[in-house]
């Protein structure tokens, strides 16, 4: 158990010790080698990189150098990432074999290892993190500590003002004052719908009950989404602190984090954080001598997408099959085991402590008039800088794709972006300058969603994309209501017909009518939003749907049943890249000759299209 005085002593001592993490002019002889241990870098041997650094430091008897495990730095496309502080040198795509060179040149001799520096958008090497274009338009609030602290060390979290907001709440603020601050900040739920967070807290507090619960929805199931996972891996205490603040505000003494079991690193670090917080007396009975008691447990989900819906999540925590409940009553009135329950997602909670410490005016000054603060996106697909980004609300899609994301690989054109995953919609090229906020996205037929942002180039078929998301929805439907269970299957059957070259023009009207009926009649938000990807692609790419239905043509050749891959002789330079990359030897021609496709051998895999630097194959 640690008293408040002891917590503050830890904060002051550790803050001086860790000044070099953020201050490049830190007055210290010590160096910290920060190694990303998020899921992406871990899969690329970052734990082995850490072990190699530690072994070399010990073997060479090097003093004043520490190797630190961190969460995600964000620039996943360049991982594994190693940053050396205080000089802030940013090394990209580091391998275990590179460790000795970094130790010898950088740590011992003070020389930068030029070949490992990250290449920026302009092709130049960037020596420091802040020099990279990827970070220049970002503003980190929810990701404040990710890539900075060791997520498995509570003292490091405390050093960067961790649990200071909880202290302020418990010693200086009433429940209503806490809720008022959250309301005035303008924070809206980051799980998808954007419901005002303070209002949700207020509604839950107002309900009488002998027992209330605080729940964290960490069941992140959208394809390509990894925002919540990265926060839990890089800064788990931020979520624990925010849940404790929420518990105080609404009058709850128990919290649950519902996280999918497919996130083993996040689950492990969450449990370490909970154990540490209990050991310090930050979770448990009569926290810091007050009359407030609060504890948190983890519940593992089995990967059902529908459990991202709040009432299905509650059913799962209670031990039943994860199926949505009819609303009303809403969880604020009757949630977990029939008791008043507050549910927010990971990113929403990750903003709370900063709002308490910096004030609602500070937070509401960021973003747009109706969409305050920042938003974390998992940027993926056909973009150079795949990774985790956090930008102020109102940042345009163009800025995210080209300034932060580094543009489209291989000189291809931007075609569309899918926001909100299977519940979201498609944004075409003509809306590249749309501000990313709740209202603007809704106006063009998309939605914020939890934050998955998939970029597509001009090689992608939008009919096939719609089919992909419907396949996901059909497989993940809980089956409770007929519109979602049967309607989405009928929609998928029509899309499969179109992609197989067997569709008819009348199928397009049927597809739209089915989509509209499912939106109106499904029980839960996931069923109601399931047709969104289809409706938005049909709205902006109607010509592709008509080509599939009427002309039996897929312009991108992605629908193999209708594809005939050919070489444009005027564009072909005879370089032979397509021939060398073809997995079945279907490309024919001699060196420096224009190539041709043997249609009998061609399996329509598209490898030649993607490998041709002159866009001569299609």
Image (cartoon, rainbow, N blue to C red):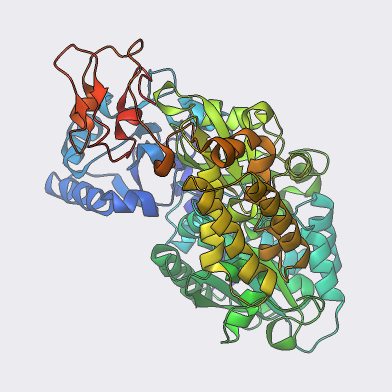
List x then y, in percent, for residue 133: 50, 26
Q: Give the left or right position of residue 421, taking residue 41 as reference.
A: right
Residue drawn 57% across and 83% down?
Answer: 321
Asked which quadrant contains residue 252, the reply is: bottom right
Q: Give the left or right position of residue 133, taking residue 425 as reference.
A: left
Residue drawn 35% across and 30% down?
Answer: 565
List x then y, in percent, for residue 8: 58, 61
In the foreground, 414 or 510: 510
* Quarter placement of the C terminus: top left
Is residue 190 shown above or below 484?
Answer: above
Residue 294 at least partly seen? no
In the foreground, 458 or 13: 458
List x then y, in percent, for residue 413: 51, 24
Residue drawn 14% across and 17% down?
Answer: 590
All told, the count of numbered labels is: 0
Residue 75 at least partly seen? yes
Residue drawn 43% across and 17% down?
Answer: 122
Is residue 66 shown above or below 458?
Answer: below
Q: Give the left or right position of residue 578, taking residue 553 as reference.
A: left
List x then y, in percent, for residue 11: 54, 56
Asked which quadrant contains residue 575, the reply is: top left
Asked which quadrant contains residue 370, the reply is: top right
């Amino acid at each position: 158990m640690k008293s408040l005085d002891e917590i503050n002593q830890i904060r002051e001592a550790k803050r001086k010790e860790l000044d070099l993490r953020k201050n490049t002019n830190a007055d210290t002889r010590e160096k910290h080698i920060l190694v990303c241990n998020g899921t992406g870098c871990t899969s690329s041997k970052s734990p082995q990189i850490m072990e190699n650094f530690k072994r070399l430091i010990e073997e060479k008897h090097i003093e004043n150098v520490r190797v630190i495990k961190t969460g995600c730095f964000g620039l996943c496309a360049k991982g594994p990432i190693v940053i050396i502080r205080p000089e802030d040198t940013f090394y990209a795509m580091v391998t275990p074999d590179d460790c000795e060179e970094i130790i010898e040149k950088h740590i011992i001799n003070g020389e930068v290892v030029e070949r490992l520096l990250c290449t920026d958008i302009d092709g130049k090497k960037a020596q420091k993190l802040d020099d990279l274009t990827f970070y220049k338009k970002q503003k980190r609030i929810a990701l404040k500590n990710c890539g900075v602290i060791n997520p498995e060390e509570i003292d490091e979290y405390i050093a960067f003002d961790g649990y200071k907001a909880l202290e302020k709440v418990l010693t200086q603020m009433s429940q209503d004052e806490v809720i008022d601050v959250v309301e005035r900040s303008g924070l809206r739920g980051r799980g998808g719908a954007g419901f005002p967070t303070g209002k949700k807290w207020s509604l839950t507090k107002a309900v009488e009950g002998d027992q209330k619960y605080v729940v964290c929805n960490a069941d992140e199931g959208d394809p390509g989404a990894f925002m919540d996972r990265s926060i839990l891996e890089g800064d788990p205490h931020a979520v624990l602190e925010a849940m404790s603040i929420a518990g105080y505000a609404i009058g709850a003494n128990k919290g649950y984090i519902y996280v999918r079991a497919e996130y083993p690193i996040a689950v492990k670090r969450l449990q370490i954080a909970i154990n540490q917080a209990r050991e310090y007396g930050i979770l448990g009975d009569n926290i810091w001598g007050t009359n407030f008691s609060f504890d948190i447990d983890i519940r593992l989900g089995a990967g059902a997408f529908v459990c991202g819906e709040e009432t299905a999540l509650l059913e799962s925590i209670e031990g039943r099959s994860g199926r949505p409940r009819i609303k009303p009553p809403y969880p604020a009135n009757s949630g977990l085991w029939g008791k008043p329950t507050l549910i927010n997602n990971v990113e929403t909670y990750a903003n709370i402590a900063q709002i308490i410490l910096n004030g609602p005016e500070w937070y509401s000054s960021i973003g747009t008039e109706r969409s305050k603060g920042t938003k974390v996106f998992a940027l993926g697909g056909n973009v150079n800088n795949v990774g985790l980004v956090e930008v102020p609300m109102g940042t345009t899609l163009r800025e995210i794709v080209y300034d932060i994301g580094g543009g489209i690989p291989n000189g291809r054109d931007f075609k569309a972006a899918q926001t909100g995953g299977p519940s979201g919609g498609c944004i075409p090229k003509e809306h590249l300058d749309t501000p990313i906020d709740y209202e603007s996205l809704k106006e063009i037929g998309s939605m914020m969603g939890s934050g998955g942002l998939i970029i597509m180039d001009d090689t992608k078929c939008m009919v096939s994309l719609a089919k992909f998301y419907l396949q996901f929805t059909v497989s993940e439907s809980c089956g409770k209501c007929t519109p979602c269970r049967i309607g989405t299957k009928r929609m998928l059957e029509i899309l499969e017909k179109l992609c197989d070259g067997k569709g008819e023009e009348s199928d397009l009207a049927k597809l739209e009518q089915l989509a509209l009926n499912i939106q109106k009649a499904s029980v839960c938000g996931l069923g109601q939003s399931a047709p969104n990807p289809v409706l938005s692609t049909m709205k902006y790419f109607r010509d592709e749907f008509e080509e599939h239905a009427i002309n039996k043509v897929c312009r991108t050749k992605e629908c193999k049943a209708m594809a005939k891959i050919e070489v444009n002789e005027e564009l072909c330079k005879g370089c032979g890249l397509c021939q060398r990359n073809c997995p079945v030897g279907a490309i024919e021609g001699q060196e420096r000759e224009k190539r041709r496709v043997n249609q009998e051998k061609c399996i329509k895999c598209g490898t030649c299209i993607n490998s041709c630097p002159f866009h001569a194959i299609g």
